[in-house]
Amino acid sequence: MKLQLKLITACTLLALGLGAHAAPLIIKYSHVVADVTPKGQAALKFKELAEKKLPGKVEIQVFPNSQLFGDGKEMEALLLGDVQILAPSLAKFGKYTKQIQLFDLPFLFTDIQAVDRFQASKEGQGLLTSMTKKGIMGFGFLHNGMKQLSANTPLGMPSDAKGLKFRIQPSDVLEEQFKAVGGNPQKLAFAEVYQALQTGVVDGTENPWSNIYSKKFHEVQKYIMESNHGVLDYMVIGNAKWWAGLPPDIQKGLTEAMKESITFGNKVAFEEDMAFRQKVIDDKKAKVLPMNKEHLQAWRTAMQPVWKKFEGDIGKDLIDAALRANGK
Ligand code: LMR
């Protein structure tokens, strides 16, 4: 009897003790790129900051390199609640909103600073809440950088792209962009790009320097053209329903950590883009070719019809706001 009482007391104390140290809330943050990229570093910074601001209350699990979910599955997983935070490229929202296709229009922004100005504008910020009804909330925009064209033949003029197969992100705008120069675009998940280039499933692609270097695309491409013809940036998003159900103190801590981690990631993007370019050059695997004004003008002219095609879906107001950010 005495032993029984002792056991009950011990169990009660144990239960009370456990109650005082409730398990932290697990938050999964999944993405498809390497840890060294601006997005990879921003995700790790978010983990560091959130766990510091909310000690014992949250545990952030970061899954890089498509380890948890690749391109095809991640949005679905977010909406099902299997993952809480993602940072897909702005080219991957076509199913949920047509407006964000804006960012894929070729030669829309003059440089990443212009992209930054647009994202900070009223119109840009409005896009963060444009998918709330679909269950997706935007925390903020995160930079990677301007895209460079790559292939196994030099692409000086747009006619050089004729008949070549290009890997693209799942974006109808990017599909039309390559069709406009006579190329054959193929939508492929990011995790499949290296092998597709290596085996000749596709002849070329487009990506910013950090992705080219960290995924070794320059080892399976002979030429990289410094085209800066478009942008590859991200929206960091969360499951809207999950977010709305979080206690206010957790929301506050996570909001702060997210803001600071995005600022950090953007700093990395600004500061390291040229360093990744240099690493690609130093590796001497692919030849990095500059594009002169005449070349760029020819590509711009060839791709210009894409704007008209998507103007109705995206909205002329939004395109004009983006152009204003260029200072034009
Ligand atoms: C791609 O698919 O090329 C990119 O969106 C990958 C990424 O997340 O930067």
Image (cartoon, helix red, strand yellow):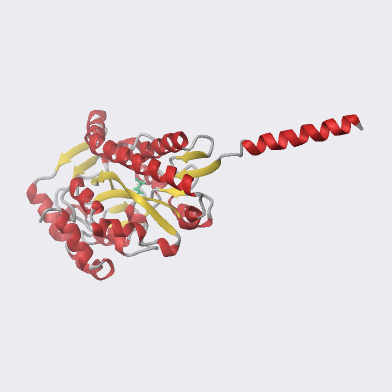
Q: Depth check: 96 or 170 in front?
A: 96
Residue at the image point whose x is 19% and y is 60% from the top: 321
- In x, y percent, where is residue 111? 17, 47
Identify whether 190 is placed above or below 176.
above
Residue at the image point whose x is 38% and y is 54% from the top: 138
Residue at the image point whose x is 39% and y is 61% from the top: 131
Q: Depth check: 257 or 286 in front?
A: 257
Residue at the image point whose x is 14% and y is 48% from the top: 156
Q: Depth check: 117 or 243 in front?
A: 243
- In x, y percent, where is residue 82? 54, 51
Looking at the image, the residue that sits furthest to the bottom is 312
Quarter-of-image position of residue 21: top right
Which part of the image, by quadrant, shows the C terminus? bottom left
Which part of the image, by quadrant, shows the N terminus? top right
Q: Is residue 295 left or right of residue 256?
A: left
Q: Is residue 141 left or right of residue 158?
A: right
Res. 38 visible in picture: yes
Q: Is residue 173 left or right of residue 114?
A: right
Q: Depth check: 327 or 272 in front?
A: 327
Q: Is residue 44 left or right of residue 23?
A: left
Identify whether 136 is placed above or below 148.
below
- In x, y percent, where is residue 98? 32, 65
Res. 220 visible in picture: no
